[in-house]
Image: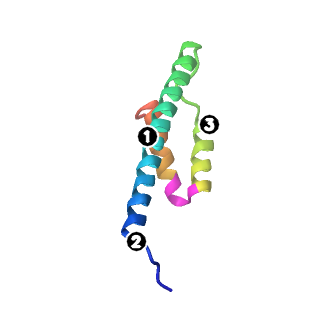
Amino acid sequence: MTLDVTTLDIVNMRERIDEIDATIIRLWQERAGLSQQIGEARLAAGGTRLVLSREQQILDRFRDGIGDGGTQLALLVLRAGRGNL
């Protein structure tokens, strides 16, 4: 069976990818900002900057949802919000 994809189909799919990328970037920035606010609030209240059990939940969620590569993506997402350790 051959896949009959026209040039127009490819253009349309690439446009949709660009839209998805823009959404991912916007959400990434929003998430990083929220994470930074939470870290600042925890520090101001005398707590720690990060909670390891929460980070593990996020790592697990990404791995379960994406597969093995999800862990690497989760690490990048976490770093965006809290910076390097």
Along the polypeptide, which appears first: circle 2 or circle 1? 2
Question: Which segment is the magenta one?
Answer: 66-70
Along the polypeptide, which appears first: circle 2 or circle 3? 2
Along the polypeptide, which appears first: circle 1 or circle 3? 1
Mark 2 and mark 3: span between their CA atoms?
46 Å
* Residue of label 1: 25
* Residue of label 2: 6
To which quarter of the image does residue 11 belong?
bottom left
Q: Nearer the viewer, residue 9 or 24?
A: 9
Q: Which mark is residue 44?
A: none
Position of residue 45 relative to residue 68, above or below, is: above
Foreground mark, 1 or 3, reads 1
Whether tag 2 and tag 1 are in contact, CB under 8 A, the answer is: no
* Residue of label 3: 54
Q: Residue at x 49, y 25 (%)?
A: 36
Q: Position of residue 33 (x, y in %)?
A: 48, 27
What secondary structure is marked by label 2?
loop
What secondary structure is marked by label 3?
helix
Name the residue type under label 2.
Thr
Position of residue 28 relative to residue 38, above or below, is: below
Q: Position of residue 47 (x, y in %)?
A: 58, 19
Q: Residue at x 47, y 44 (%)?
A: 75
Q: Position of residue 17 (x, y in %)?
A: 43, 54
